[in-house]
Amino acid sequence: MRLSLIFVLALSIHILNAQDSNGPKAVSFAEKMRPTLMKVVGEKWTIKLIGEQASVAVVGIGVVLPPLPKISEDARSTAIYDKKEDTVKLKKELEEKYYYSYLKEIFEATRMIKPNDDEIAKMMNVLSQGGTREGIYHQLVLDSTYGGMENYDKPVKSNAADFAVYFYGRYLGKKIEKESLKGMNAFALKRLIADKSLDIIDAFGDKRDDLEKWYAVMSSDLASKFPQVWTAKLRKDTSSQHHKIWASQVPVQHIKSETMIKIHSAMNSMMN
């Protein structure tokens, strides 16, 4: 039965790919089917049927993943203090309008529970006194509460490990082995992926356009891979162009906060 299903899928993909070749190129039918195939026949047969996913590809129309910057591993580096002022700013009153929704979403994405009024008030106070979205994030994942979560008996599942290997290679420029994640705590892994993503965002430096492209391709990819996770219209959008336009209109702190929410939310969906 399983072999019959695989044969039918292979034949269908072959026919539809042939039809796709006559139209404009965007995301191929095979790539659209990849998440479903992974669930139905597993990674091994998915690769046999449609091949490896390209490391650099057009997602949507026109946005290509840029070359990834090198992340400095020098603990003595002072590059973080040499960052130029953000070229995109929002008026203070407009920025403050988004405080509550951000705090609620980042709390739920990291802790997997809703914040109470007292927790919201404390974080709101930090932002109102000049704190950053990134600072709030670090506050949530570096405290004793999250530290306790990293000690839960919550090992990384196989599909989450596959995703981590893929994400590290494609978006962080690092090769990791699935075997190295065996027995690792799921809360620890999602924090590490998010932290490395922040490092990459900082490493783009003043190459703002490349940062926007990286974010756009990554967001389009996550929208395709985890359609069941997102409720917001833009987060569900698989068009990398739309994500690029959004990223070009907001401060880097907003790009960082969306990246953190998306990574944690995607990983959360593979923990239950």
Image (tube, rainbow, N blue to C red):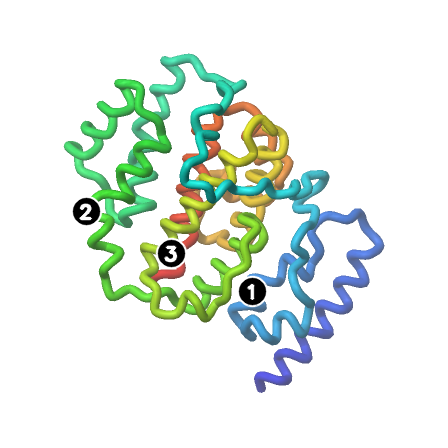
Q: Is residue 109 above or below residue 204?
A: below
Q: Is residue 53 visible?
A: yes
The disc labelled 2 sits on which kind of residue? Ser
Label 1 element class: helix
Q: Is residue 195 above or below residue 166?
A: above
Q: Are marks 1 and 2 in contact (CB under 8 Å)?
A: no
Q: Could you tell me which quadrant the C terminus lies in?
A: bottom left
**Dot placed on the residue nearer the N-terminal end, 1 or 2:** 1
- Say which quarter of the image contains residue 205: top right
Residue 211 percent location from the top left of the image: 57, 34
The disc labelled 1 sits on which kind of residue? Thr
Badge 2, how many Cα within 10 Å: few under 14, some, many 20+? few
Q: Nearer the viewer, residue 167 or 17?
A: 167
Q: Which residue is mark 3?
A: 189
Q: Which residue is mark 2?
A: 144
Q: How many marks?
A: 3
Q: Are marks 3 and 1 in contact (CB under 8 Å)?
A: no
Q: Which residue is mark 1?
A: 36
